[in-house]
Image: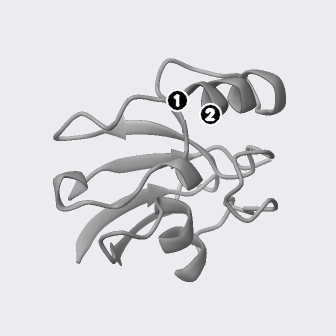
Amino acid sequence: MTRLVFIEPSGNRCEIDAADGESVMQAATAKGIAGIDAECGGSCMCATCHCLVVDAVNPLPDMQSAEADTLEFTAHQMHDNSRLTCQLTVTPTMDGTVFQVIGR
């Protein structure tokens, strides 16, 4: 299991254990993280799982063009550290990564 940290829109900090191989979005929704609605079910179409990567011990995989396009055209303001959690697969190297949930 990999430990992920989410800061919900309310400021509440939640630490969860995520199974390696699932998406960060799946892990967050399974644990009831507020603000990650995942309306498209992980299809990289709605940006309702948009988070900011606040702290990562190891670099995350590069953003692919579909994720960048979705963030640019459907998300709240895109930042340099914006990511769609549906496009990130949990791996042990992500242990301790902190995500700020954007919410709506």
Label drawn at residue 67:
2
Query: Are the two marked residues, 2 and 1, in contact with CB atoms closer than 8 angstroms?
Result: yes
Give the color scheme: rainbow, by chain, secondary structure or one colour: one colour
Q: Nearer the viewer, residue 72 or 32?
A: 72
Residue marked by disc 1: 64
Residue 29, given in percent of the width and then of the height, sits at 60, 73
Residue neighbourhood size for the residue with mark 1, other residues' Cα within 10 Å, grouped as few (<14), some (14–19), many (≥20)? few
SS of the residue under disc 2: helix
Task: Say which quarter of the image contains residue 42.
Answer: bottom right
Is residue 87 shown above or below 67? below
Residue 67, given in percent of the width and then of the height, sits at 62, 34
Identify which residue is drawn at 18% across, 61% down. 92
Identify which residue is drawn at 17% across, 52% down. 93
- 77 left or right, relative to 56: right
| Circle 2: residue type | Glu
| Circle 1: residue type | Gln
Identify which residue is drawn at 48% across, 63% down. 23
